[in-house]
Image (tube, rainbow, N blue to C red):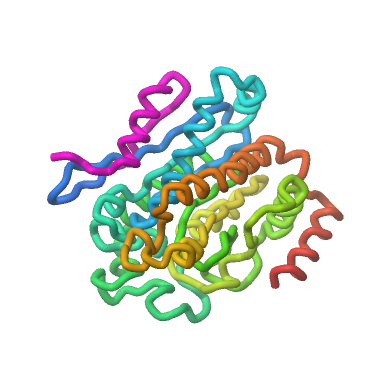
Amino acid sequence: MPRDLPELDALERLLAQHAQHLHVQQVCHVALPQAPAFPVYAIGLGSTDPGAPAAGFFGGVHGLERIGAQVVIAFLQSVLHRLPWDSTLQHLLERVRLVFMPIVNPGGMWAATRANPRGIDLMRNAPVDARDRVPFLVGGQRLSSGLPWYRGRLGDPMEAESQALCSVVQTELLGRPFSLALDCHSGFGVTDRLWFPYAHTREPMAHLAEVHALQHIFLQAHSQHPYVIEPQSAQYLAHGDLWDHLYLQACQQSGTVFLPLTLEMGSWLWIKKNPQQLFSRNGIFNPLITHRHQRVLRRHLGLLDFLTRAAASHSQWLPQGEARQHHHRHALDAWY
């Protein structure tokens, strides 16, 4: 039976073409009753030193948001195609570890659903409860898998896809002196947003100063960037956020910094420019017109490249002492 999942086919062709540069794992398989089992891949590239900084790029957590997986695959393709001739990139990868999980939820992508094939929203699936009131349904619910944003039954283990993502992050990113992650989504508002924790509380994260310092160097390098940078709690709270769960784990390890970010691409802008997309479930979350789709893929490559370089050079910009206090105060003023 054909899989009919072009993103997975494109990823596997890319992995086969550049196998000599990559460490590829099938971290889990997703079985469906009417389709072949889908592998979930984790891909490693660059330094193998466990003390090296790392950057992780994730997509396809929500099956409907195909553009997130496509952005991660486009960046991986760019890196791999440049690697044979780009000596600057070659030297960079000697100092930094890159990790990719472009399609975390292949079953949901195949079925064109936000949730995985069991009806569970992976980004509401972690064992973290919001401390304050969440929006009805949107913030996560345990009523029924027939409704969106279903968390799963209380007490059940996390879904295989959620566990696979957490395992990759715990193995490849946490415990290093510095690491960051970018999870690519779409579907919120008309503006592209970069969110940082928390989703479960409006309290500031422990590494607020480090996020503010990262924003500072990003503004210096990309003064005309299109993003609103803010804590997710500025928009809404939610139960079960995987990145809150992983960040809280990282905070238990001394001497390390882990900064998880979420790219939320503003798909309402694509609908505004092409209202016919409202009549397509795929069109609500993804650009359908070819030139706009290509523009979106180009638009975000600079961000992913910046995060790679920021991770590799973290010692040059991470604030210490009085500078850290300065960034913390300015972050509170700006975001809280």
Total numbered badges shown on the rendered structure:
0
The boundaries of the magenta stretch are: 1-28
Q: Using residue 312 as the reference point, say whether residue 97 is left or right of it.
A: left
| Image point (52%, 73%), residue name | 236
Displayed quadrant of residue 151: bottom left
Give the position of the N terminus as an image quadrant: top left
Q: Vertical placement of 282 versus 143: above or below?
A: above
x and y, in percent, of residue 143 in the image: 28, 77
x and y, in percent, of residue 28 in the image: 30, 42
| Image point (62%, 26%), residue name | 89
Q: Vertical placement of 60 versus 23: above or below?
A: below
Q: Using residue 303 as the reference point, say whether residue 30 is left or right of it.
A: left
Q: Vertical placement of 318 versus 90: above or below?
A: below
x and y, in percent, of residue 208 in the image: 69, 60
Look at the image and say whether residue 4 sits in the magenta stretch: yes
x and y, in percent, of residue 91 in the image: 65, 23
Give the position of the C terminus as an image quadrant: bottom right
Front residue of this view, candidates 200 and 113: 113
Displayed quadrant of residue 328: bottom right
Task: Examine the rendering and report whether any part of residue 9 can be seen.
Answer: yes
Task: Examine the rendering and report whether any part of residue 126 can be seen.
Answer: no
Give the farthest residue toward the right: 322
| Image point (31%, 73%), residue name | 142
| Image point (56%, 47%), residue name | 300
Look at the image and say whether residue 211 sits in the magenta stretch: no
Front residue of this view, candidates 252 and 151: 151
